[in-house]
Amino acid sequence: MVLRLLFVLLIALNIAVGAWLLLGQNEAHRSFANDPGVPKLKLLSELPPPATTVAHAASSTPSAATSASSPAVAASNALTPASPNANALSYTCMALGPFATQEDLRIVRNELGAQTLRMRARQEQITESRGWWVYLPPSPSHAAALAQARQLGARNIQDYFVVGSGDNQNTVSLGLFKDPANARKRRDDIVAAGFPAQMSERTETVPEYWLDLIPLDSKHFDWRSRIHDPGIGSHSTGCF
């Protein structure tokens, strides 16, 4: 009986050990399927979407929003008025003058300097009339010129003199007139008295001064408010 009981106990112990080995090792194997530090295997369906896909989706969303809002932005830009300063200023090159002296030009230059972008002074030579001269042509000698003068006196013709030197030596001058009409009348009276009187314009080359400038704002450049000389004018000129 004792041996039978020991045999039964031994069999029960073997069954218990076998059950523990079978059930206990599977549980431990299930708990530690991978070595420590090694990531677990997952199914493809369990993986998160790739980062590039997420980034593309994120970037495509603002693009779509931007695309959708583009007509509104364009309309907004179309309705936005231009800057008030755009094309508000206009530039024109002009010349002021003529000035009789360099000092006159300097004064105006200082007066208008703050209203101009650039300025330059220039000088021109012009031929200016000094009046109309009535005279008798030069005689062959000074004695012959004096004889002509005495003949004029004998005809009660006054206001004459004999030129004794220079380019018009031995010429009898009968007067210098600013008005050509008065000069013609004097010449005609002398011719009527029997003398070969002539008439010519006396000219002289003189300098005149101009101020070329570029106003900061040509549309609102009122130089007349600062320069009151009626002899000064303006005209457009080439830019410099």
Image: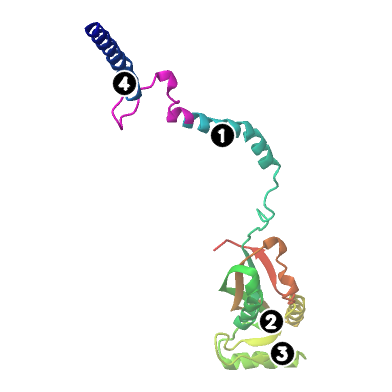
Give how far across and how far down residue 172 sits, in percent. 65, 87
Residues at discs 2 and 4 in contact (Cβ within 8 Å): no
Q: Quadrant of the C terminus?
A: bottom right
Residue 196 seen: no
> Which residue carries the number 2 mark?
134
Q: Residue at x 74, y 82 (%)?
A: 190
Q: Earlier along the polypeptide chain: callout 3 or callout 1?
A: 1
Q: Which region shows up in magenta? A: 33-54
Q: Nearer the viewer, mark 3 or mark 1?
A: 1
In-front residue for pair 180/61: 61
| Residue 179 percent across, percent down from the top left | 75, 78
Q: Amino acid at mark 3?
A: Leu
Cα separation between marks 2 and 4: 142 Å
Mark sitting earlier along the chain (4/1): 4
Residue hosting label 1: 62
Q: Amino acid at mark 1?
A: Pro
Quadrant position of the N terminus in the picture: top left
Q: Nearer the viewer's eye, disc 2 or disc 4?
A: 4
Tell me the residue that label 4 is attached to: 29
Q: Are marks 2 and 3 in contact (CB under 8 Å)?
A: no
Q: Indicate which disc, 2 or 3, sits on the residue closer to the N terminus.
A: 2
Mark 3 and mark 1: Cα distance apart in space? 110 Å
Helix, strand or loop under label 4: helix
Neighbour class for label 3 at 10 Å: few (<14), some, many (≥20)? some
The structure's colour scheme is: rainbow
Image quarter of residue 186:
bottom right
Amino acid at pointer 2: Val
